[in-house]
């Protein structure tokens, strides 16, 4: 997967600018390559297997002997670290629940860090994508929540998630921004010209 290039990022910024001409809500978009590197998982599994496998063989067939057990632990740990750190193998070892939890946690962190809790009227909206995890979150502050409720957001999240999976991240962002702008424009029409938050796509590489 590759993050959006400069031209594509400008398209996202333009879509936000157009949406915010219709509403007082403040939209922010964040695209993360991944929510975590999960480097600890290969080490964890390497340690577990390096300890368990020689011990199991020793118990079943008496090999390796007690003297060779420590050597076997160390050599197997080193070998497993090399193998399990391969991207495809590491991805297979990572539970889906952990992927979702880390991505959701990063989304909520970004909601705070991008100052979406400090907008006038509490109308901040975050559209977040973690590309490796193929995870999408739409988080809203209190002022926008009644007009982008959980049911509406679920539909938008499902659509954007599918586009990310298909490699159409740019199109997904633009369509989601336009949909949010249309819905919010009906209930939170623009009453002031100020732009409280930047429109550019925030990239977490």
Image (cartoon, helix red, strand yellow):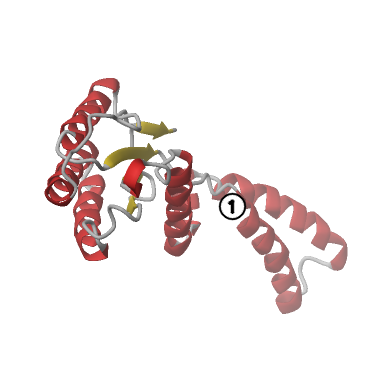
Query: At 20% across and 36% down in the image, what residue appears?
Result: 20
125 relative position to 205: left or right = left
Expressed as whole percent of the image width and height from the top left, the position of residue 69 reads 81, 62
Residue 11's place in the image compared with 107, above or below, is: above
State the image coordinates of residue 195 (x, y, percent, origin top left). Answer: 29, 30
Q: Is residue 66 above or below residue 79?
A: below
In the image, residue 83 sits, relative to residue 147, either above or below, namely above
Residue 128 visible? The answer is no
Q: Quadrant of the N terminus?
A: top left
- In depth, the one of 141 and 60 nearer the eye is 141
Q: Identify which residue is drawn at 31% across, 28% down.
A: 200
Which residue is denoted by mark 1 in the rendering? 42
At x 18%, y 48%, the residue is 184
For the image, the number of numbered tags is 1
- Give percent across and percent down for residue 143: 30, 53
Q: Residues within 10 Å of mark 1 (few under 14, many from 20)?
A: many
Extreme-bottom residue of the structure: 60
- Residue 127 shown left or right of residue 71 in the figure: left
Q: Quadrant of residue 177?
A: top left
SS for callout 1: helix
**Which percent across, then down, holds residue 21?**
16, 33
Q: Is residue 21 visible?
A: yes
View extreme (right): residue: 67
């Amino acid at each position: 997967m590759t993050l959006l290039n400069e031209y594509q990022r400008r398209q996202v910024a333009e879509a936000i600018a157009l949406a915010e001409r219709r509403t007082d809500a403040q939209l922010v978009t964040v695209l993360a390559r991944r929510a975590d590197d999960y480097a600890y998982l290969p080490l964890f599994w390497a340690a577990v297997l390096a300890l368990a496998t020689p011990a199991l063989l020793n118990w079943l067939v008496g090999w390796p002997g007690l003297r060779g057990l420590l050597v076997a632990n160390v050599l197997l740990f080193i070998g497993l670290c090399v193998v399990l750190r391969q991207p495809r193998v590491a991805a297979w070892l990572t539970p889906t629940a952990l992927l979702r939890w880390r991505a959701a946690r990063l989304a909520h962190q970004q909601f705070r860090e991008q100052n979406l809790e400090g907008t006038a009227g509490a109308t901040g909206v975050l559209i977040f994508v973690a590309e490796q995890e193929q995870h999408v979150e739409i988080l809203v502050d209190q002022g926008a929540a009644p007009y982008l409720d959980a049911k509406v957001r679920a539909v938008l999240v499902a659509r954007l998630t599918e586009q990310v999976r298909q490699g159409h991240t740019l199109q997904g962002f633009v369509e989601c921004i336009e949909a949010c702008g249309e819905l919010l424009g009906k209930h939170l029409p623009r009453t002031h010209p100020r732009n409280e938050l930047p429109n550019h796509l925030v990239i977490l590489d």
